[in-house]
Amino acid sequence: MIKSAYLQRVYNDVLTRDPNEKEFHQTVLEVLESLDQIIDQHPEYERRGIIEAFVEPERIISFRVPWVDDRGGIHINRGYRVQFNSAIGPYKGGLRFHPTVNLSILKFLGFEQILKNSLTTLPMGGAKGGSDFDPKGKSDDEVMRFCQSFMTELQRHIGQFVDVPAGDIGVGGREIGYLFGQYRRVRGTYAAGVLTGKGLTFGGSLVRTEATGYGICYLTQEMLKHMRNDSFEGKTVVISGSGNVAIFATEKAMQLGAKVVGLSDSNGYIHDPDGIKLDVIKDIKLNRRARIKAYADEVPGSTYADGFRGIWSIPCDIALPCATQNEIDAGTAKLIVKNGAMAVTEGANMPCYPEAVQIFQEAGLLVAPSKAANAGGVATSGLEMSQNSMRYSWTFEEVDHRLKDIMANIFQNIYHAAEECGKPGDLVVGANLAAFKKVADSMLTQGLI
Ligand code: NDP
């Protein structure tokens, strides 16, 4: 519930202007509820229309993406780039290729990205883009032709000082390679800083592949240490998803002494009470691009069940939802609480409905919100941009060390912001406030743009 009349008016305008964008409404409401804590101390935000501007993207680009499949069939997909806010730096945010992609989802992700990027302390504005194209089941050549067509249009809207896309669901190293190749071909310039998540042989950064998953665990470790005097050591962990984020969260949680017993994909989930065998899952998902069901066929003692939500029936100490948005509803949250979890870190963007977060917080679980927890990915993209500008590469250890420092700083910032506004321990509010202040003050200082 929003208390401030000004914030409520802004929210009502968002609902009226785009009534069908439910994911976008959900994230705007969460952030405006947090801003309630500080809005009275900042009359200048209302006077200068800062919140109205904050919820309206600077620019939305939508375009046709024609491509030809291996049998000669013609397909037309829709491509988008939402350039949401560039007050603190060039637009930065991933590209998602998934059949569910629409403007509501990209606006929600772009809006979250503004705040996430602000938390990293690096100079990056917020954006998100993608397409309703489904890479699943497509050949490498089909994916290449799609990426080339997508970039043929996108290239006119991006650049190292303008907008720097990266990966997200359905866009990994393979897709970034094809996108970068097409950018280079069309523009006739080797501008490495135009995309991040590149291969290591053409300007990519060590640790970028691992960064989001590792960062989630670094932030969780800080939260456990400072708020419970505890750690991952000896804990049982369940992680949803089995893509880039989930796999490297699994790797780091194991390195920190935890046992990961469950992973999922959009069809179902696996349970391995002895602990997931990382090499097997990496081979299945990263090399063979197969379904997670294959794990149970290959590893004795493990089981597979249909339906991805069932994963949350596996008891755990720490839950890391790392698949997609709105995976954990109130019923699932109650189950996780009943099974005795102590912490939930949102690895995916907005994996929990607001009711679920409330249930966790009321039950005394630690909750780390996604815009803080998964910021390690974009932070390391920022480090990739720095290395591209310097024409220099840091070692794995150097980048990992910086990532760890960034995640520790993010934890401190959001923890103290929550305390300062009188909501100690509420890292959801803390993250929104710590992130918003810098963006809002930059918008104020730069005048109406
Ligand atoms: P991937 O495409 O590598 O993996 C996504 C995983 O989630 C797959 O296991 C996929 O299963 C599952 N999944 C996707 N959609 C659904 C769905 N509707 N229902 C159930 N499961 C689903 O993506 P990432 O690992 O890169 O991204 C995961 C999350 O992390 C997303 O929310 C993304 O926005 C967020 N994120 C990613 C960052 C990155 O650096 N990659 C950075 C910050 C946030 P299946 O294979 O069956 O589709």
Image (cartoon, rainbow, N blue to C red):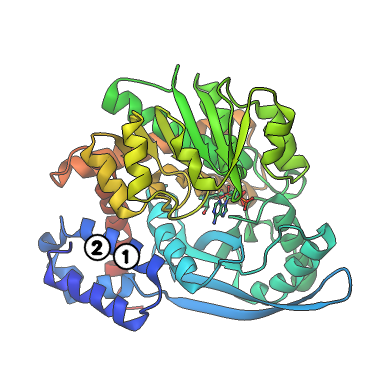
**Amino acid at circle 2:** Leu
Q: Position of residue 404 (x, y in %)?
A: 47, 32
Q: Mark 2 vs ligand 1: CB under 8 Å?
A: no
Question: Which secondary structure, mark 1?
Answer: helix
Count residues near mark 1 (Cα–Cα under 10 Å), then give few for <14, some for 14-19, many for 20+: many
User: What's the distance in space between the residues labelled 2 and 1, CA to CA?
Assistant: 6 Å
Q: Position of residue 446 (x, y in %)?
A: 32, 71
Specify whether residue 327 is in view. Answer: yes
Front residue (pair 67, 336): 336
Q: Position of residue 154 (x, y in %)?
A: 65, 73
Question: Which secondary structure, mark 2?
Answer: helix
Left or right: residue 116 compared with residue 205: left
Left or right: residue 260 compared with residue 387: left
Q: Mark 1 vs ligand 1: CB under 8 Å?
A: no
Numbered tag placed on residue 32 in the rendering: 2
The mark tally for this picture is 2
Specify whether residue 430 is in view. Answer: no
Q: Is residue 348 above or below residue 445?
A: above
Left or right: residue 248 compared with residue 141: left
Splitting the image into 4 quarters, where does residue 232 fall? top left
Count residues near mark 2 (Cα–Cα under 10 Å), then give few for <14, some for 14-19, many for 20+: many
> Residue beneath label 1, please?
28
Q: Residue at x 30, y 77 (%)?
A: 15
Splitting the image into 4 quarters, where does residue 180 fall? bottom right
Q: Is residue 42 above or below residue 237?
A: below
**Amino acid at circle 1:** Val
Q: Are marks 2 and 1 in contact (CB under 8 Å)?
A: yes
Q: Residue at x 65, y 43 (%)?
A: 205
